[in-house]
Amino acid sequence: MRIETATEAGRPDVPNEDFVSVALPAAGQGGALVLLDGVTPPADNGGCMHSVPWFTARLGGALLELTVTRADLTLRQCLSAAISRTADAHRDTCDLSHPLTPQATAVVVRWGGAEVEHLVLSDSALLLEAADGTVTPVLDDRIERLRAAGLRVAPLRNQEDGFFTAAADPAVAARAVTGRTPAAALRSLAAVTDGAARGVEVFGTDDWPGLFALLRKAGPQALIARVRAREDADPAGTAVPRGKPYDDATAVLVEF
C-alpha cells in the first residue's frame, strides 16, 4: 500500500485551516482517511473564541478516531458524533448558533473487508480509480448548482435549499453524499480540498483524470506546486476571478 499526503497554507503569514490524517490500525487490514477544509470566516467570527485550525484539528481527530474504532457506525453517524463532541468542547464559551461559527468541508473514507465506504460533505472532492484506470469523482455539488443558478452562496450555508458544512449541528451529517464500492473494484483513491483542485474547478486547465494521473506519477506536493504556479501567474485574481487569490491546498493519495 502506498499513502502520500501534502498540505500547504495559501499564505505563509496565515495558518493553514485544512486538516488531513490517515490511520492504519495494527489490528487489521483496513484503514481510514479524513480530509477537512476549514471555512475561513470574515472579520466577524460569529462570537467564537477559537480559530478555524482549532476547530478542524478537534473535529478531524474525533472523526478519525470514531471512523477507525466504531465499525458499527456508518460514516454519517461517525460525522454526527464527531460534530457533537467538538461542539461540546466549546459550547460553554462560544455562540454555536451563529451561522459563522467555525466549520469545515469533509471527506471521509474507510476501507477493509469487502467494501470501501466514503462520505463527502461540501466542496472537497474524492476521486475513485477503478481497476481499469477509470477515475470517478465523488462530489457534493450543491455549491456549484447554486453558483450556476446565479445565487450568492454564503447566505445559503447550512440552509434548506442551500449547502451544508460540518459546524455545530450534528444533523447536517445526514446531508452528506455517501456510498460504498466493492474493494476489489478499486485500485486507488485520492481526496483533495478545493484549493488543491483549482486546476479543475477554477482555472479549467485540468480534468479529474489528469489531476489523478499527476498525483500517481509525482505525488501530492507536485499537484500543489502546479496549482501555485497558476495562482502565481495571476496573483491578484484578475484574469481568473476567485474568492481568494491563493488558497490552502491539501491532497492525499491511497493506492491499495
Image: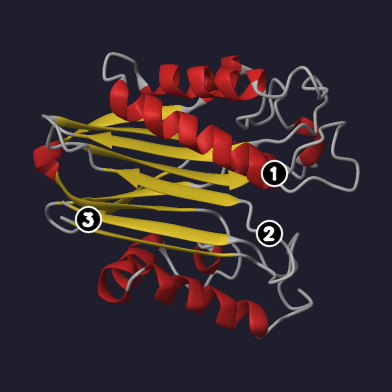
In this view, the mark in front (2 or 3):
2
The Cα atoms of the two marked residues, 3 and 1, are separated by: 35 Å
Residue 91: x %, y % from top left: 74, 19
Q: Residues within 10 Å of mark 1 (few under 14, many from 20)?
A: many
In this view, the mark in front (3 or 1):
1
> Which amino acid type is shown beneath numbered disc 1?
Val
Residues at badges 3 and 1 in contact (C-beta under 8 Å)?
no
Earlier in the chain: of badge 3 and badge 1, it is 1
Left or right: 19 as drawn, with respect to 185 = right
Closer to the camera in the image, 183 or 7: 7
Residues at badges 2 and 1 in contact (C-beta under 8 Å)?
yes
Q: In this rendering, is residue 67 above or below 200?
A: above
Q: Say how the picture is coloured.
A: secondary structure
Q: As drawn, which residue projects farthest toward the right? A: 44
Residue 53: x %, y % from top left: 65, 47
The residue that disc 2 covers is 15
The residue that disc 3 covers is 134
The Cα atoms of the two marked residues, 2 and 1, are separated by: 9 Å
Residue 184: x %, y % from top left: 9, 40
Position of the N terminus, as image quadrant, is bottom left
Earlier in the chain: of badge 2 and badge 1, it is 2
Residues at badges 2 and 3 in contact (C-beta under 8 Å)?
no
> At x 66% / y 86%, what residue is drawn?
233
Do we see residue 95 in this rendering? yes
The residue that disc 1 covers is 52
> At x 11% / y 29%, what residue is drawn?
114
Element class at badge 1: helix
Earlier in the chain: of badge 2 and badge 3, it is 2
Q: Where is residue 64, by image quadrant?
A: top left
